[in-house]
Amino acid sequence: MSGRMHKGWYIRAGRGPGRGGWQQADLPSTEDLGAWLAGRLPDDWFVAPPEVTVDREEILIVGELAPVEGDFPDTDTGRAERAAAASGRIARWREATRDERIEIARQAEHRYSRKVAWGARIGEVEELFTMASVPVMTRLRQPERIVLDTLVDAGVARSRSDALAWAVRLVGQHAEEWLTELREAMAKVDELRSKGPTTKGGEAS
């Protein structure tokens, strides 16, 4: 994955099929995306320039919100309360900015021909919303798509579908014992279900 800076903004670019990444001839360039967002986003939304990640299908914008005020002790309970407060503030920001985010997304989608997704974080608490899922033998979100695109760009696979199959094979090779235990557990569940009480129709209740 590569990226570039624009006046404090870091734009991360996902890679795509073929060595050298996606051939973008059929998509508008995102070279000016950082400048466009810097001018379009309200100044009081985030405490710093947001992290922006771009791939062929989606622009993901994740911004840092102001920290939560309060005296939270450094205990399990205190940390849980701080995380809950952060999650609540993110939810409030999400609702308060919904209409304007929809309008910004509409404009960006028209300009860059990509869907726009949003997220927010406070410290270690991060929540993503309105993310697109793209069919690739299953439905994947941007972080997973970027993993597949990296494998393709490195020449490990010829396409996202090949990369997904490669990843599944790799998991199978390194998790065979766990997968065997899982299959055995599922077989036991099926056996117990077949021995369970039956209804008048003869099926387990």
Image (tube, rainbow, N blue to C red):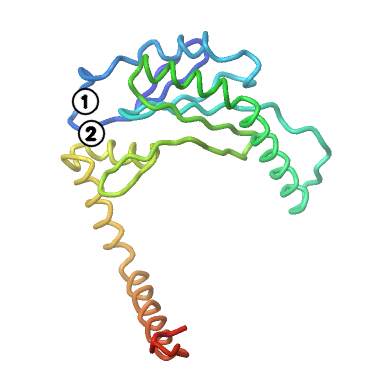
Residue at 23% x, 33% y: name it.
153
Under mark 1, the amino acid is Gly
In the figure, is residue 199 to the left or right of 165?
right
Residue for point 39% across, 10% down: 32
Does dot 1 land on a helix, a strand or a loop? loop
The N terminus sits in image quarter? top left
Which disc, if any, is residue 153?
2
Residue 170 location, x and y as percent?
Answer: 27, 56
Q: Which mark is residue 3?
A: none
Q: Is residue 128 above or below residue 198?
A: above
Observer-nearest residue: 130 or 87? 130
Q: Residue at x 33, y 21 (%)?
A: 113
- In the rendered structure, the answer to whether residue 64 lies left or right of residue 172 reads right
- Amino acid of disc 2: Asp
Expressed as whole percent of the image width and height from the top left, the position of residue 4 reads: 40, 17
- Asked if 18 appears above or below 133 in the picture, the reply is above
Describe residue 194's horizontal placement relative to residue 22 as left or right.
right
Q: CA distance from mark 1 to mark 2?
A: 6 Å
Q: Which residue is mark 1?
A: 20
**What residue do we see at 29% from left, 30% from top?**
15
135 left or right, relative to 109:
left
- SS class, disc 2: helix
Q: Is residue 108 above or below residue 77?
A: above
- Would you say the residues marked 1 and 2 are in contact, meaning their CB atoms lie under 8 Å apart? yes
Sequence-first tag of 1 and 2: 1
Q: Residues within 10 Å of mark 2 (few under 14, many from 20)?
A: many
Where residue 149 sits in the image (x, y, percent)?
27, 36
How many marks do you count on the picture?
2
Quarter of the rendering containing residue 13: top left
Q: Residue 61: x percent and y percent? A: 49, 26
Q: Quadrant of residue 101?
A: top right
